[in-house]
Image: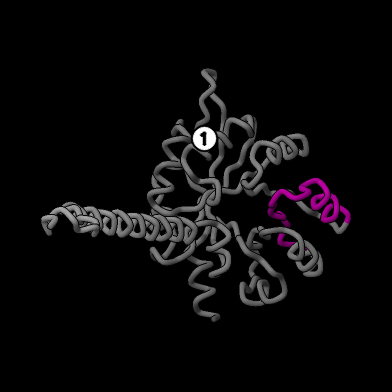
C-alpha cells in the first residue's frame, strides 16, 4: 500500500505565500496613496492659477519691483485678497532677463512668486518673449502670469512662444476686439481695455477673452461699485490697491 504521505495530489502551499500576498496589498496601498497625493498636489497647484483666482473674484494688480512677493509688500490689505504684481522686464547685455528698476533676475522673482502664490503681469518691453516664456515654464508659473507685449509684432511672437500662457492684447474698438480674437486663434488671451472704453466693448471682449484687464480711472467722481457693475472686469491695475480694496469692501 502506498505511503499516505506520497500519494496526496493536493498542491502543497508555499509558506511564503501569505507574505507575498501581504506585500502585494502593501504595494497596491502605496500606489493608491501616491495617486491620491498627486491629485491633491495638482488640485493645490491649480487653486493658485490665474483663471481659478478670477473665478473666485476680482484680481487687484499693482506695480512692483520683484523685491518681495507677499500681498502686504504689494500694498494689499491681507493675505486672502487676490494679489497680482505688475513687473517691468528688460534684457541685459549678457542675455539675462531682469526686473526693472533694479536688476533682480526674472528667474529668481518667478521662484519667489510661486512660493508666495502671487500672480504676475509681465511687461515684456524689449525682451524676447520666447526667453521669458522659457523662464516661466522652468518656474512652473505658466498658469500664473500674463504677458504684456509692447507691440503688435511682439504680441504675435508672444502668442507663439507658449501654447497656454495668457497674453494681453490691447483693445480700443469693436474692430480691434474682433482682430484680437482672430490673432489669438485658439490661444488663450486677455483683452486689455482703457477704463474710458464703453461698457458695451467690455461686454463684447468678455465673451471671447479668457480675462478682461483694465485700470481704475483716477477721477474725483469715480465709483468702483458703479464702474464694475457696468463692466465685466477680471483684473484691475491700480497704484492704490489698498484704497481700491477698501472701497470695494465698503460698497459690497
- Nearest the camera: 156 or 171? 156
Look at 62% across and 37% down and name the residue there.
Answer: 124
Q: Could you tell me which quadrant the N terminus lies in? A: bottom left
Q: Position of residue 154 (x, y in %)?
A: 72, 35
Q: Which residue is mark 1?
A: 135
Look at 51% across and 25% down and name the residue there.
Answer: 96
Asked if the magenta segment contains residue 190, the reply would be yes
Asked if the magenta segment contains residue 121, the reply would be no
Decide if residue 203 is on the left or right side of residue 120: right
Q: Is 92 rendered above or below residue 199?
A: above
Look at 41% across and 66% down and name the residue there.
Answer: 80
Residue 19 placement: quadrant: bottom left
Residue 153 placement: quadrant: top right
Q: Is 146 rendered above or below residue 129?
A: below
Q: Could you tell me which quadrant the C terminus lies in? A: bottom right
Is residue 100 in view from this perspective? no
Look at 62% across and 64% down and name the residue there.
Answer: 234
Magenta segment boundaries in residue numbering: 175-197
Label 1 SS: helix
Decide if residue 141 is on the left or right side of residue 162: left
Q: Position of residue 127 (x, y in %)?
A: 62, 30
- Nearest the camera: 86 or 167? 167
Amino acid at each position: 500500500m502506498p505511503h499516505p504521505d506520497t500519494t496526496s495530489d493536493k498542491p502543497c502551499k508555499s509558506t511564503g505565500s501569505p507574505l507575498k500576498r501581504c506585500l502585494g496589498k502593501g504595494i497596491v496601498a502605496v500606489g493608491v496613496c501616491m495617486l491620491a497625493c498627486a491629485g491633491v498636489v495638482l488640485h493645490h497647484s491649480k487653486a493658485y492659477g490665474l483663471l481659478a483666482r478670477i473665478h473666485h473674484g476680482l484680481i487687484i494688480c499693482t506695480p512692483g519691483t520683484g523685491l518681495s512677493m507677499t500681498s502686504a509688500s504689494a500694498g494689499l490689505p491681507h493675505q486672502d485678497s487676490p494679489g497680482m504684481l505688475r513687473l517691468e522686464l528688460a534684457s541685459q547685455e549678457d542675455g539675462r532677463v531682469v526686473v526693472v528698476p533694479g536688476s533682480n533676475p526674472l528667474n529668481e522673482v518667478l521662484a519667489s512668486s510661486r512660493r508666495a502664490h502671487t500672480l504676475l503681469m509681465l511687461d515684456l518691453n524689449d525682451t524676447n518673449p520666447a526667453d521669458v516664456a522659457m523662464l516661466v515654464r522652468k518656474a512652473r508659473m505658466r498658469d500664473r502670469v500674463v504677458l504684456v507685449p509692447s507691440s503688435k509684432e511682439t504680441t504675435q511672437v508672444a502668442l507663439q512662444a507658449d501654447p497656454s500662457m495668457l497674453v494681453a492684447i490691447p483693445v480700443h474698438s469693436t474692430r480691434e476686439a474682433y482682430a484680437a480674437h482672430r490673432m489669438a486663434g485658439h490661444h488663450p488671451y486677455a483683452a486689455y481695455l482703457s477704463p474710458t472704453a464703453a461698457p458695451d466693448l467690455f461686454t463684447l471682449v468678455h465673451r471671447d477673452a479668457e480675462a478682461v484687464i483694465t485700470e481704475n480711472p483716477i477721477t474725483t467722481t469715480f465709483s468702483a461699485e458703479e464702474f464694475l457693475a457696468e463692466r465685466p472686469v477680471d483684473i484691475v491695475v491700480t497704484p492704490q490697491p489698498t484704497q481700491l480694496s477698501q472701497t470695494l469692501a465698503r460698497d459690497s
